[in-house]
Image: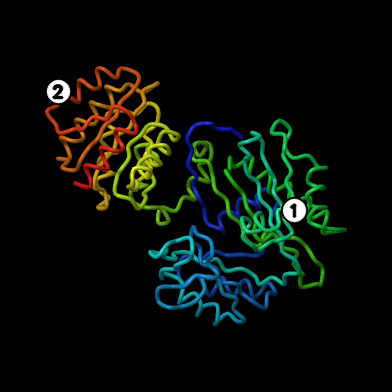
């Protein structure tokens, strides 16, 4: 596992894909079958019923939480349904597949459901929360567990912080058996459930480590009653996000990427190794470095406007990347002005300036453009901009640049 201190973004995968990875590392999951078309739904439901499950759970697969409480734009309520028969499961699928589901995390636009997950209905006895993530304050992996499964963990942390158990892991040795036992005990597991919990907790941590994940979250992790009356622990729901800096080592996981779940401009930016996230404001930002990008967005907000995007071109952007960044920015119809804020450390300010001039000429930019350059080869960069013959507003400081772009947009 690499602890990357540079900018990183996360790639999300679907629940069914997360469970496939978890199962690979020994984590118990329910019998589940993904279906990407209505033709695949009935055979999947029949297979689950034949395995002894009286109920079939039909779960919409989108990269957003709150699916169960979501509403389809057709008016159908709920992106997760429990069917009492195969025919009912097919009926639910017909109302979900190919339709847009709106949840508290998708925004009003919602997400189109293009995959369903059919699962065996579980007789749930108790729900827990379990997650593994990186505690950046301590530079160590952190396992978080709570007896309050199924709830929003932020709400639990706010109202009942004593119900969240935390265990830091030494990255040099990984999770030790005594630590897995401590976590299982904190959840109140006993007897066979304790042993099953220790195995599952170890498997969840190993999934996080071996897959270079940013986070692995089970909510809920559940004690369920099997057909023979025995109880066991299984990952009923799972979410995994991955550090995209490490994806070059995981071709199998990269193949799980679902471009239908990502914004088109973000997909285009990734082709040029640009870190881009679309926001709702009107002033576009082109910055090098995540920290400077965050500060730039903050100062735009401070000056009374809102940023239209987060765009980090990285520490060594080329002329081609700068040109691509401008083209991506200009595809957002809400953009009314552009602020370029570059601090040249490794970055050569003149390379950025050359890219800006080329991009403005190529795109025929008509919007206000404010550029603030500082650092490596800044004199040459400012000279390139000044001699370009283009209408480019110069900012002496970050605050000056932000004030100028906000003023220009309002004129």
How did the renderer colour the structure? rainbow
C-alpha separation, residue under disc 2 versus residue under disc 1? 63 Å
Q: How many marks?
A: 2
Q: Nearer the viewer, residue 102 or 305?
A: 305
Instruction: Identify the element where label 1 is drawn.
Output: helix
Q: Horizontal and vertical percent for residue 124?
A: 72, 70
**Position above or below: 116 against 141:** below
Q: Quadrant of the N terminus?
A: top right
Q: Nearer the viewer, residue 175 or 360?
A: 360
Res. 387 mark: 2
Quadrant of res 361 = top left
Instruction: Identify the element where label 2 is drawn.
Output: loop
Q: Horizontal and vertical percent for residue 23?
A: 66, 53
**Position above or below: 104 against 49:** above
Quadrant of res 339 = top left
Q: How dense is the environment of label 2, judged by Cα within 10 Å: few (below 14), some, or many (20 and up)?
A: few
Q: How dense is the environment of label 1, judged by Cα within 10 Å: few (below 14), some, or many (20 and up)?
A: few
Question: Hey, which residue is sitting farthest left in the picture?
Answer: 389
Q: Horizontal and vertical percent for residue 394?
A: 23, 29
> Could you tell me which residue is drawn at 55 percent across and 66 percent down?
117
> Could you tell me which residue is drawn at 19 percent across and 31 percent down?
358
Res. 162 mark: 1
> Which callout, 2 or 1, points to the residue nearer the camera?
1
Question: Hey, which residue is sitting farthest right in the picture?
Answer: 191
Q: Is residue 109 left or right of residue 115?
A: left
> Could you tell me which residue is drawn at 57 percent across and 59 percent down?
16
Q: Nearer the viewer, residue 82 or 76?
A: 76
Q: Are marks 2 and 1 in contact (CB under 8 Å)?
A: no
Mark 2 or mark 1: which comes first in sequence? Answer: 1
**Position above or below: 50 against 332:** below
């Amino acid at each position: 596992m690499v602890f990357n201190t540079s900018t990183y973004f996360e790639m999300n995968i679907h629940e069914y894909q997360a469970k496939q990875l978890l199962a690979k590392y020994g984590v118990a999951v329910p019998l589940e079958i993904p279906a990407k078309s209505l033709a695949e739904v009935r055979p999947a439901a029949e297979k689950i019923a034949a395995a002894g499950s009286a109920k079939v759970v039909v779960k919409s697969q989108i990269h957003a939480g709150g699916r169960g409480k979501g509403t389809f734009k057709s008016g159908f309520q709920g992106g997760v349904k429990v069917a009492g028969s195969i025919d009912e499961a097919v009926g639910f699928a017909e109302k979900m597949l190919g339709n847009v589901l709106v949840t508290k995390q998708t925004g009003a636009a919602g997400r189109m459901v293009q995959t369903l997950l059919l699962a065996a209905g579980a007789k749930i006895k108790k729900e827990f929360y379990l997650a593994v993530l990186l505690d950046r304050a301590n530079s160590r992996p952190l396992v978080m567990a709570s007896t309050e499964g199924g709830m929003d963990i932020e709400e639990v942390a706010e109202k009942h912080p004593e119900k969240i158990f935390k265990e830091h892991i030494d990255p040099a040795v990984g999770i030790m058996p005594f630590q897995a036992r401590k976590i299982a005990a904190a959840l109140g597991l006993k007897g066979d459930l304790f042993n099953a919990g220790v195995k599952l907790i170890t498997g969840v941590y190993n999934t996080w480590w071996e897959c270079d994940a940013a986070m692995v979250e089970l909510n809920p992790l559940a004690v369920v009653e099997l057909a023979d009356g025995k109880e066991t622990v299984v990952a009923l729901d799972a979410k995994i996000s991955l550090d995209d800096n490490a994806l070059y080592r995981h071709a199998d996981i990269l193949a799980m990427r679902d471009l239908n779940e990502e914004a088109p401009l973000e997909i285009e930016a990734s082709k040029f190794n640009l870190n881009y996230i679309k926001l709702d404001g009107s002033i576009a930002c082109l910055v090098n470095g995540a920290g400077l990008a965050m500060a730039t967005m903050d100062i735009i907000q401070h000056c009374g406007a809102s940023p239209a995007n987060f765009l980090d071109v990285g520490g060594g952007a080329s002329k081609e990347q700068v040109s691509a960044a401008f083209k991506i920015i200009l595809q957002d119809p809400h953009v009314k002005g552009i602020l370029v804020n570059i601090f040249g450390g490794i970055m050569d300010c003149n390379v950025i300036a050359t890219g800006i001039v080329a991009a403005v000429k190529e795109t025929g930019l008509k919007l206000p453009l404010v550029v603030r350059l500082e650092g490596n080869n800044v004199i040459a960069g400012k000279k390139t901009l000044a001699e370009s013959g283009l209408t480019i507003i110069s900012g002496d400081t970050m605050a000056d640049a932000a004030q100028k772009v906000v003023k220009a947009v309002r004129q």
